[in-house]
Image (tube, rainbow, N blue to C red):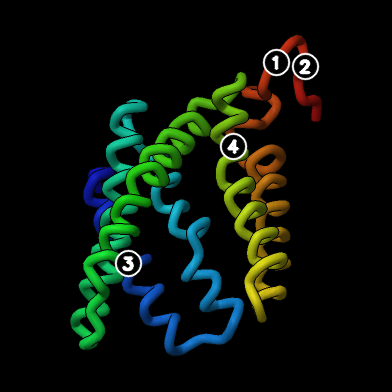
Amino acid sequence: MPTSLLAVLGGALVGVATLISETHFGEIPNAFLDSIAVWLIASFVVGAAARTRTHAMTVGLIACLAEVAGYYVAAAARGVPGSPHEIAYWTACAFPGGLTFGLAGRFYREGGGLKGVLGAIALPVAFAVEGLYTYAYVEHRDQAGAAWVLIALLLAYAFFVALPPFTTRNAPRMNGWTRQK
């Protein structure tokens, strides 16, 4: 499947799933789908599948824009359209998020060195920051905040220990340091 099509379909699916979760699920499942960090996963994944860094940024942006479009088209179909200001705000947010996390996915795929490390820490950092903010500042969402921090730790473990490209063959090499198995 072409990466651009994957970005559109995956993004729209995340947007629609978020809208559905807002009315049908409890705190943590709803918070999971209604999360900025979760919305950035699609951009990261399609960025990792992209052919070049420029393509990764482009499909990352497409995924985020499709998430916004999927959410607000589904909301309008349910008779609850978003305000123009709200749609403009989230569309504007899609640009830095999509471009950055699309590129992070590509950097992770390339592996090794500082760029590979930056790509690998992008999603764990997004989950950790959102989790800490949610835990500290959002009322009645402390369980979700704690869950996000746990997800951040699990993602960091997965990216650096369990998943390629940071296996022993492609371990990051920075200032003579190499991760040993």
Q: Earlier in the sequence, mark 3 or mark 2?
A: 3
Please name the residue that numbered disc 4 is placed on. Answer: 120
Please name the residue that numbered disc 1 is placed on. Answer: 174
Please state which amino acid type lies under the numbered disc 2. Answer: Trp
Does residue 169 appear to the left or right of 21 in the view shown? right
- Contact, mark 4 vs mark 2 (Cβ under 8 Å): no
Which mark identifies residue 177? Answer: 2
At label 2, counting other C-alpha atoms closer than 10 Å, the crowd grade (few under 14, some 14-19, many 20 or more) is: few
Tag 4 secondary structure: helix
> CA–CA distance between discs 4 and 2?
17 Å
Please name the residue that numbered disc 3 is placed on. Answer: 13
Q: Earlier in the sequence, mark 4 or mark 2?
A: 4
Tag 2 secondary structure: strand
> CA–CA distance between discs 2 and 1?
5 Å
Q: Earlier in the sequence, mark 3 or mark 4?
A: 3
> What x and y, as percent, mark residue 122?
56, 41
> CA–CA distance between discs 1 and 3?
39 Å
Q: Residue at x 26, y 67 (%)?
A: 70
Write down the quadrant of residue 66 in the picture.
bottom left
Please state which amino acid type lies under the numbered disc 3. Answer: Leu
Q: Nearer the viewer, residue 134 or 16?
A: 134
